[in-house]
Image (cartoon, rainbow, N blue to C red):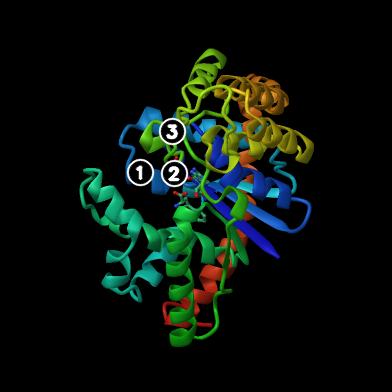
């Protein structure tokens, strides 16, 4: 069983990324073969600043290693260190109906936010399909927002296999229901682009201030409250043990429990959970040569897997003799 996911280096990672993508793949390390990459080609669709892209790419690397990604067990690499993916994207693009891409919500959302309709943004899902298919991935942990891109990937893989012969494994998305959408401090989906995130390794004072700003309803202190509709609880339960969760639920339902107290409990549990990661990250920052070495080895292993698939695909379409 091979598991793969990619994360764009387009800003500081937040707890939506952690629960939606990082934690599931890190916990899979023991169960199968996992591949994780930093999607810097994809980030170029929105980040046009070299210093920022380089810094964000390194930050994502540090964040994953700090949060427990083990580069011995997981093939961890930068997308652009395996340029083979671009060739596969081309082979897939010759089969990609325009209409399929025109229907992609993520593309339409980006345009609605005022981004220019570039070819890169439009063909983003084709490159993503290439990422997934190049490594013959079985399972792709992603947040709910990426589900459609996985459907595009499956469509393209099936089309290619039908037209040119069996080359690709058909991947399945893995979308943990509990954390399908982690809410941000304003109650919308937590996302870098909405400015509503709680960063994994942000400044502690700022983190606390953000948590204290989480939007709630305006029930009075003495009123019983509904955990199921509360943003604070939605975040708390991601960190909490079953006992902590049950206790907080009882507090909500019992009344005389204010949102301020719940927010403080959330802050404390967040800090406690991330403390070991924070300490490890500080060590890694002092040893960037090690991080570079991790990327170098990761790229080597990724390229070995990539070249097997790419050769099959090239042979299948007639670019190369079998
Ligand atoms: P952002 O929306 O902040 O730009 P990305 O689109 O780069 O985040 O997402 C990186 C990974 O984290 C993807 O797998 C995505 O689905 C997941 N993810 C991002 N935000 C959330 C969220 N709020 N809830 C669950 N998963 C998320
Ligand atoms: N599009 C994904 C996101 O924004 C990042 C990504 C690129 C990805 N290639 C991928 C995720 C392949 C999973 C598999 O979150």
- State which quadrant residue 312 falls in: bottom right
Residue 127, quarter of the rendered image: bottom left
Task: Please rate how many residues cluster around mark 3, counting C-alpha atoms within 10 Å: few if below 14, some from 14 to 19, many from 20.
Answer: some
Tell me: 131 left or right of 276. Answer: left
- Please report contact status of discs 3 and 1: CB closer than 8 Å, yes or no: no
Dot 2 crowding, Cα within 10 Å, few <14, some 14–19, many 20+: many
Are discs 2 and 1 less than 8 Å apart at CB?
yes
Which corner quadrant holds the C terminus? Answer: bottom right
Residue 223 rendering spot, x and y as whole percentages: 56, 28
* Residue position marked by numbered label 2 in the rendering: 40
Q: CA distance from mark 2 to mark 3?
A: 11 Å
Relative to 214, does residue 119 appear above or below in the rendering?
Answer: below
How many numbered dots are placed on residues in this image? Answer: 3
- Observer-side mark, 3 or 1, equals 3
Q: Is residue 35 above or below residue 295?
A: below
Q: Point out the tag, 3 or 1, that comes first from the N-terminus.
A: 3
Q: Secondary structure at mark 2?
A: helix
Q: Residue shown at 74%/48% (left/top)?
A: 73
Q: SS class of the residue under badge 1? A: loop
Q: Which residue is mark 3?
A: 11
Which residue is under mark 1?
A: 44
Q: Quadrant of residue 67?
A: top right
């Amino acid at each position: 069983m091979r598991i793969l996911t990619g994360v764009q280096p387009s800003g500081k990672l937040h707890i939506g990324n952690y629960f939606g993508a990082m934690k599931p793949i890190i916990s899979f390390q023991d169960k199968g073969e996992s591949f994780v990459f930093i999607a810097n080609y994809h980030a170029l669709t929105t980040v046009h600043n070299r210093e920022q892209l380089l810094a964000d790419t390194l930050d994502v690397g540090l964040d994953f290693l700090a949060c427990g990604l083990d580069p011995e067990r997981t093939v961890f690499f930068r997308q652009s260190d395996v340029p083979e993916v671009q060739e596969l994207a081309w082979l897939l693009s010759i089969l990609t109906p325009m209409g399929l891409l025109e229907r992609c919500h993520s593309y339409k959302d980006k345009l609605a936010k005022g981004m220019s309709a570039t070819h890169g943004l439009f063909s983003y899902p084709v490159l993503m399909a290439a990422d997934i298919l190049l490594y013959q991935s079985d399972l792709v942990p992603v947040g709910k927002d990426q589900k459609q891109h996985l459907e595009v990937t499956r469509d393209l893989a099936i089309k290619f296999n039908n037209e040119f012969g069996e080359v690709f494994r058909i991947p399945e998305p893995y979308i943990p229901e509990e954390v399908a959408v982690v809410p941000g401090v304003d109650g919308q989906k937590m996302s870098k682009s909405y400015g509503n995130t709680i960063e994994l390794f942000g400044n502690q004072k700022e983190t606390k201030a953000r948590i204290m700003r989480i939007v709630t309803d305006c029930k009075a202190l003495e009123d019983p409250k509904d955990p199921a509709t509360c943003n604070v609880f939605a975040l708390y339960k991601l960190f909490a043990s079953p006992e902590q969760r049950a206790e907080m639920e009882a507090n909500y339902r019992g009344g005389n429990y204010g949102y301020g107290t719940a927010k403080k409990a959330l802050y404390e549990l967040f800090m406690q959970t991330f403390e070991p990661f924070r300490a490890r990250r500080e060590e890694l920052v002092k040893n960037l040569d090690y991080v570079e070495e991790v990327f170098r080895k990761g790229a080597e292993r990724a390229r070995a897997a990539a070249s097997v698939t790419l050769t099959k695909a090239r042979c299948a379409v007639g670019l190369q003799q079998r």
